Image (spheres, rainbow, N blue to C red):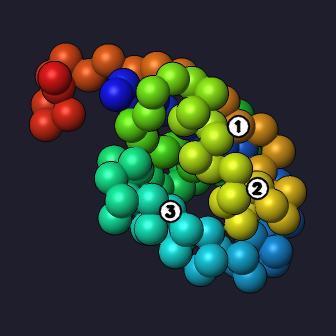
Amino acid sequence: MATFVVTYTYSPDAERLDAVRPEHRAFLGALHEEGSVVVSGPLPPTGQAAAGALIVLEAEDETAALALLDDDPFRREELVVEATVRRWVPVIGSLAG
């Protein structure tokens, strides 16, 4: 298994994001319980970037990492306008291997 970082960029539709957020968090919580999601949380908007999220997870490869999130309610409801995945190799801290 390898560690991957997935970043989401959210739709600007705050009302729909708020409505679906409990289901989205329950989905990610279930992936955390099964050991796939290491940590996740929102990325607040800045002057240069829209709101989004950062999700650190364990998977075999980039394709598998993104596939774990296929059923995310935010993705299902088209509230994620961009998702990127990248392998991450932590060398310092509690996730360092």
Give me the C-alpha separation between circle 3 and circle 1.
15 Å
The residue at the point 67 percent across, 60 percent down is 72
The residue at the point 58 percent across, 46 percent down is 68
| Residue pointed to by mark 1 | 83
- Residue 1 occupies quadrant: top left
Quadrant (top left, top right, bottom left, bottom right) of the C terminus: top left
The residue at the point 54 percent across, 35 percent down is 65
Q: Of marks 1 and 2, which one's residue comes earlier in the chain? A: 2
Q: Residues within 10 Å of mark 3 (few under 14, many from 20)?
A: many
Question: Residue 79, how many percent across, how many down?
Answer: 81, 58
Q: Are marks 1 and 2 in contact (CB under 8 Å)?
A: yes
| Residue pointed to by mark 3 | 28
In the rendered image of this protein, does residue 64 appear above or below residue 53?
above
Q: Amino acid at mark 1?
A: Ala
Question: Residue 51, how many percent across, how many down?
Answer: 67, 51
The residue at the point 64 percent across, 41 percent down is 67
Q: Of marks 2 and 3, which one's residue comes earlier in the chain? A: 3
